[in-house]
Image: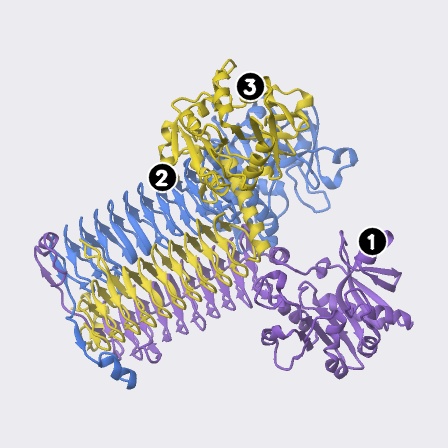
Chain colours: A blue, B purple, C yellow
Amino acid sequence: MNETQGAGLAALILAAGNGKRMHSQKPKVLCEVLFKPMIAWIRDWCSRAGIMEQCVVISPEGEEIRSYFPEGTAFAVQQERRGTGHTVMQAMDFLRAHAGGDILVLNGDAPFIDDETIRQALRLHRQEQAAVTIVTAEVEDPTGYGRIVRSRKNVSAIVEHADADDAVRDIREINSGAFWFRTDFLIDALASIGCDNAQGEYYLTDTVKVATGRGERVRAYCSENRDIVLGANDRRGLLKLNEIARRRVFDQLLEKGVNLLCTDGLIVSPDACIEPDATLYPGVIIKGNTRIGAGCVITSGSVVEDSVLGEGVTVNASQIYRSTVGDGARIGPFSHLRPDSHLAAGVKLGDFVEVKNSSIGEKTSVAHLTYVGDSDVGARCNFGCGVVTVNYDGLKKSRNTIGDDVFIGCNTNLVAPVTLGDGAYTAAGSTITEDVPGDALAIARARQVNKPEWSARFRGSKQKPGE
Amino acid sequence: MNETQGAGLAALILAAGNGKRMHSQKPKVLCEVLFKPMIAWIRDWCSRAGIMEQCVVISPEGEEIRSYFPEGTAFAVQQERRGTGHTVMQAMDFLRAHAGGDILVLNGDAPFIDDETIRQALRLHRQEQAAVTIVTAEVEDPTGYGRIVRSRKNVSAIVEHADADDAVRDIREINSGAFWFRTDFLIDALASIGCDNAQGEYYLTDTVKVATGRGERVRAYCSENRDIVLGANDRRGLLKLNEIARRRVFDQLLEKGVNLLCTDGLIVSPDACIEPDATLYPGVIIKGNTRIGAGCVITSGSVVEDSVLGEGVTVNASQIYRSTVGDGARIGPFSHLRPDSHLAAGVKLGDFVEVKNSSIGEKTSVAHLTYVGDSDVGARCNFGCGVVTVNYDGLKKSRNTIGDDVFIGCNTNLVAPVTLGDGAYTAAGSTITEDVPGDALAIARARQVNKPEWSARFRGSKQKPGE
Amino acid sequence: MNETQGAGLAALILAAGNGKRMHSQKPKVLCEVLFKPMIAWIRDWCSRAGIMEQCVVISPEGEEIRSYFPEGTAFAVQQERRGTGHTVMQAMDFLRAHAGGDILVLNGDAPFIDDETIRQALRLHRQEQAAVTIVTAEVEDPTGYGRIVRSRKNVSAIVEHADADDAVRDIREINSGAFWFRTDFLIDALASIGCDNAQGEYYLTDTVKVATGRGERVRAYCSENRDIVLGANDRRGLLKLNEIARRRVFDQLLEKGVNLLCTDGLIVSPDACIEPDATLYPGVIIKGNTRIGAGCVITSGSVVEDSVLGEGVTVNASQIYRSTVGDGARIGPFSHLRPDSHLAAGVKLGDFVEVKNSSIGEKTSVAHLTYVGDSDVGARCNFGCGVVTVNYDGLKKSRNTIGDDVFIGCNTNLVAPVTLGDGAYTAAGSTITEDVPGDALAIARARQVNKPEWSARFRGSKQKPGE
């Protein structure tokens, strides 16, 4: 049986903190590590551990957080900050709805927990029939963290750093802030904890006291992943999390056989899939759910976000957003694929090319200084330099349709909606406003006139060229 | 009372060194740290400490240095290199002009002194009525530096590393090369020091001997900023100064709440002001007196120099020089603002756009492959792709004037000087040489002709398209 | 006498390894360090040491390797992998052809050997009349390497790490895998070694046993260059080699007086020559045999490959391939020189400009959004914005010829082949299909017509602009 499947399995994510020390307009949990908000890391680790029932406690300023979760996610709002215990109390409806099961409670700003740790902690929690299982780690320097006081399996207390004597301070096993609770126990225990302390706050860790007082079992699952304890309170801490996360991704990529020649300035999303034998230059940025095929070469200055690249694609100092690129396509330098662009295999996009919301067929070449927007382009076409798909007339956007084997002359305007048949040809410098039948030539330009000796006169006088 | 205000307060900057070990054509003090010449660091620290009377001693090859100082700065030229004492002697006129006060003497190639150190050293100098106050620092490894021999407040000597016995070598307080002098004392003392030493040079540090010989007080102000002692003699040293300076700036930015996700290749001018919650990607370069508002996002590959960006501006892999950008504007990828460009709030500049010496009104969109030069553009305009403001006719440059709500068709030439009235419209592919009244359509292009079956014949023959 | 000259001097390069652990499609020795395949490093070190007779042993999958060597290089193919001794046996023809001399045997995947080490090892080899001279290095951590057991000059054995006792494991002098052999001895010895071991392989190092058994001299040349022992078996190792190689190049550049302000993401080819006082920004990539003159400034995002730049050239975020650029030229930002472009002194290329297979004369300006392909352009020309050399008609490519002092209007098409005489002028928006005589104006465009109040009506209706 999969340990993480079963009745009542749920997670409660504490995300009510503000970003004051971050000096951020956004809620703290939306601060990003590798371009992914911290809370999205938590959301995904829980999902990968099989916990689909999630409840998020936000502050009144945290409404934006809702949009990062799928429909069906539960939310609770904490009106005032009165400690972690109080935060959990806000989700009492969710807890009750999941009575009879187990619930994971964890912080929304400690992004390096992992699904394996979550699963293993649950396994221990259930095997031991514990009321609480604390997820812990053993670290070099435990200063500032709550220490796990235990005798073998049996945890007797979490002692905060400030309250610890020398013996306890020597303990290097610390509380990560994530806990598996028997949900029924948690509901009960929350009713028992008070706020009779210096800050006047309710502490979630006081539930451990409640458990030991009742003779319930408290366990600790010590993860091998020490980074689970890491969070960020300020920009310095957030930079540190980014550095750690970058290196973790690099380790995985190198292991897999991705060619990294220098990792300076390279940032790869934790959700990206880079195939072996692909090459990433320094300074490349891969965001979101991106897939990069074997043998691709992505050079410095490139950004690829939420896109799928086939095998052997070259992206040279170009940016690609929410698009797909077929095998062997070559892009750049200095090109730009805006969302919903679909390049077939073998397409060549040269320099200073923008593509937007268009499909381009196999082996079509768009070599330079061209904009392809809202168009469907066939295979083996050749776009001259300076071609513009005129997709907007000031009122509405329209699409162009271009067949196979079409040759579009330089500095041609294709005023949408027009259709160019297979094998059509447009003369350089033409503005095409009407359909062009297959194999026809469309031309729309004035004849050249030479005015001898004009330049010499012009250099003397001040007349306007063309007059 | 402000310590650094008062009669006769002045600074003498020693800048006569050459760049031989730098292998530089430029004088050594013009070598740059964070794109700012070392001497400009010194100039600004002195100014910030309230010392506006500055004199710079340059070598005959250092004439270029003059341009880095404001009018009214004094200069002296050292014809031959005969030691630091000799360098100071070249400025005797400046010293005499500031008799009766105090003078700061410091090197032009030790950029990390700071205004607070300068002020505090002067305070001590005056409180103690010292003849000389040496600015010092305590460092881990004093090897190579002159040691400060003192008994409590009383400094008895500066002993050069080469002349030091083991006991003196253990001293970790060292001479930074900056000194406050009672000006009258300095004038006198310079007359007393000789060049009776191995190199045959006059040493400024010999004035300490003169002072102690006369029973004058010598003091040392030990700065907490240890970097004040750092200078660069070669490219390796200069690289090191750049690294140190980069990290100092990063520390300030993080403290303030700027979002840095990876600092590789990031270089931020010490004179830049970046607001909290702005984001700088790796590889961004911010030069000179640049101001970047809250919530801005500046991505890799961007360069911003001497410009002012409002709040919430996005700059994606674009370069901006001596320009202003209003709130919420979006620029890039791959665009270029040349000097004297002024974008109002909400302007959108897409990819491959150049703007030069132009103003662009609110919410105007210039989406792609366009050049806006020497033009005044109104609000809510839409530039098609490939628009060119033809501002140069081979003899002179002229300006275009474009009203509000103007729609400019793709691949349009606007041959300056032309005026487009509010709400005017130009057809794609037109070359506009005459003014367009408000709400009028201007069109200047040939009608399209389709030649059926032409392509098929062309592919067989070799005729020129259009014939 | 030059030690490395003389009859029978030859090198045998072992390159039959596969890239399995690299997860690479390519043979392992083609994996790159600073964009140069490892085997090309070996090839060049041997050549620089004066060894022009080279034989490469490849695997059946390694045919691609042949293309990296000049004509006249010998190749042998190892059909099955049976150890280094077996690899060498495949080259028996080459060995016999070089009988009577000395032969260097070395691995194709240890790129940091150097010509000085090769030469010095040969000198020792010959002075000592050795049968074998092992190239060695003393390293901090010899774990995993074969230890050199010697009594003074006399080497008695190479002991593999796995076979070493504690005393031998303490030895820090290790086998680099490169050997000088008396060729005749090597031929004999190969006949004597067996494959009577756990792996059933023939080991080249067993020749040492053969030599000592016969009373022949075995020597070791211990190089000061410890990096000679480094190779890469996987992507992590390859990244490490790249890091080491980058730093070695930086050290040389700084020593020479090149201005590096931050080395993050900077990669400079080992074969590049950068003159003193040139400046390389972070993130610059210099590939292949590139020469960059004094005073050049190459900014972040630039790529220069196999090109020659004169003095004082500025390259701003641009890419240059197999081209030449004259003194004082300024390029970028965001421009692209494709192969066989030749810019004379003082040329200005602005932003979004592509040049391909063209020559451009002195002081010509191509300021923006222009493509110059297959063209010969004179001096002091001015290209307007959006100019296109129409060099391809769908069937064949043709060249344009442009004289001196030509002014080309904006958005002009020059439909090749056309010739523009000296001082010719084209009006903005013209498509030029015929030659333009010197000093003539060519114009090919329709007259402008203004349609009053059209816009207002259009905004109400849905008619197509221009109708």
Q: Amino acid at mark 3?
A: Val
Residue at mark 2: chain: C
Q: Is residue B398 left or right of residue B16?
A: left
Tell me how far mark 3 sits from mark 2, CA to CA: 35 Å
For the question of whether residue C27 can be seen, the reply is yes
Q: Which residue is mark 3?
A: C210
Which image quadrant: the N terminus of chain C?
top right
Mark 3 secondary-structure assignment: helix
Q: Which residue is mark 1?
A: B169
- The image shows residue C172, relative to residue C435, as above or below, that is above
Lower position in the chain sequence, tag 3 or tag 2: 2
Q: At x 55% / y 67%, what residue is drawn?
A: B288
Q: Which mark is residue C71?
A: 2
**Residue B198 x/y as whole percent:** 79, 64
Residues packed near mark 3 inside 10 Å, few (<14), some (14 to 19) or many (20 plus): some
Q: Which mark is residue C49?
A: none
Count all numbered tags in the image, as a single digit: 3
